[in-house]
Image (cartoon, rainbow, N blue to C red):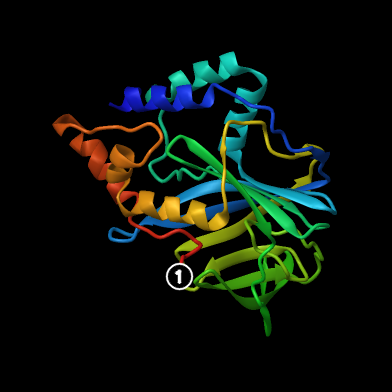
């Protein structure tokens, strides 16, 4: 069953359409460790390494392994197919997350483009940069070599605590966070279900843009509704709602259990 699922995913990615975003050169990149509680019953925490690539006008927030695979798929489809065929035999960390989203933010036009996948199907939507109504507090701590100040914000059903570097006046931020007067060094929701921690910062001359890929254009609310439907019961979703429908027999119970256990959480953005 695992090999069958992998081949479905490979076949769904082989076709590309011409929908590339105009890429611009970056000047700086910040690396973050992103963790989330995937199984709220067993308190299983998964982690991914994300990068925030930026210049003064735009930024791209992406998961580094996903970016590497998408880059290879875009520029050398043969090598990408060979790499994907070896995934099942390659050891992976049991705590590795499966995040594959991109956030391309345009600060000049106050908008962002979001891309994510739900079991092989990719979705894109655009929206205005959200407001977190930050309340900056007179609390400080040192993170690395930077003096950081605390801020409280609220967005889409979650309250966040953020620590930003007072000596790094950078407006680009991880994920969709925005509006603080310094680079975010650490941010988490108050239940500590989602956490972003800065690891490193360095010069970067790479591109800021999204790869051409086959995807569905949608709205934020429609995407969140689809994601909630998947997280509520991934097996029922794949059997009844997915673009490529699947059916699981008695021999797939271990896979079924694993999929359901890693979906026992809510997304960062909560629907009312």
Residue drawn at x 37%, y 49% as measured from the top left: 230
For mark 1, does the 10 Å Cα neighbourhood hold few (<14), some (14 to 19), or many (20 or more) residues? few
Question: At numbered mark 1, what does the secondary structure look like: helix, strand or loop?
Answer: loop
* Vertical order, 238 against 200 (above or below): above
Q: Position of residue 223 (x, y in %)?
A: 50, 51
Q: Is residue 202 left or right of residue 256?
A: right
Q: Nearer the viewer, residue 253 or 14?
A: 14
Q: Nearer the viewer, residue 60 or 121?
A: 121
Q: Is residue 78 left or right of residue 91?
A: right
Q: Nearer the viewer, residue 179 or 203?
A: 179
Identify the residue position indicated by label 1 in the image.
272
* Vertical order, 257 against 134 (above or below): above
* Vertical order, 104 against 121 (above or below): below
Which corner quadrant holds the C terminus? bottom left
Q: Nearer the viewer, residue 94 or 268?
A: 268
Residue drawn at x 77%, y 47% as measured from the top left: 202
Is residue 119 at all visible to an observer of this figure?
A: yes
Residue drawn at x 83%, y 40% as measured from the top left: 25
Q: Position of residue 204 (x, y in %)?
A: 79, 41
Which residue is at the far top?
Answer: 78
Which residue is at the far left?
Answer: 250
Q: Is residue 140 left or right of residue 84?
A: right
Q: Is residue 77 left or right of residue 42?
A: right
Q: Quadrant of residue 128?
A: bottom right
Is residue 140 at all visible to an observer of this figure?
A: no
Q: Position of residue 90 (x, y in %)?
A: 42, 25
Q: Position of residue 55 (x, y in %)?
A: 83, 50
Q: Quadrant of residue 164?
A: bottom right
Which corner quadrant holds the N terminus? top left
Residue drawn at x 43%, y 25% as measured from the top left: 87
């Amino acid at each position: 069953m695992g090999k069958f699922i992998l081949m479905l995913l490979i076949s769904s990615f082989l076709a590309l359409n011409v929908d590339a975003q105009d890429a611009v050169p970056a000047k700086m990149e910040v690396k973050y460790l992103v963790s989330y509680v995937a199984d709220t019953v067993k308190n299983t925490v998964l982690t991914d390494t994300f990068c925030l690539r930026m210049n003064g006008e735009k930024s791209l927030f992406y998961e580094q392994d996903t970016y590497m695979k998408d880059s290879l798929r875009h520029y050398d489809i043969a090598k990408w197919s060979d790499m994907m065929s070896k995934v099942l035999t390659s050891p992976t960390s049991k705590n590795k997350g499966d995040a594959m989203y991109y956030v391309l933010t345009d600060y000049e036009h106050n908008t962002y483009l979001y891309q994510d996948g739900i079991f092989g199907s990719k979705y894109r939507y655009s929206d205005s940069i959200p407001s977190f109504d930050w309340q900056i507090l007179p609390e400080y701590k040192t993170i690395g070599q930077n003096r950081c100040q605390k801020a409280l914000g609220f967005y889409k059903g979650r309250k966040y605590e953020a620590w930003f570097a007072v000596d790094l006046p950078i407006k680009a931020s991880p994920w969709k966070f925005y509006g603080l007067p310094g680079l975010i060094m650490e941010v988490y929701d108050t239940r500590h279900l989602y956490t972003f921690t800065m690891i490193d910062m360095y010069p970067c001359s790479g591109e800021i843009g999204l790869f051409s890929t086959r995807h569905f254009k949608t709205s934020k609310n429609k995407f969140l509704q689809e994601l909630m439907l998947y997280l509520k019961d991934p097996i029922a979703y794949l059997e009844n709602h997915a673009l490529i429908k699947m059916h699981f027999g008695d021999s797939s119970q271990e896979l079924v259990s694993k999929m359901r256990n890693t979906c026992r959480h809510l997304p960062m953005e909560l629907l009312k």
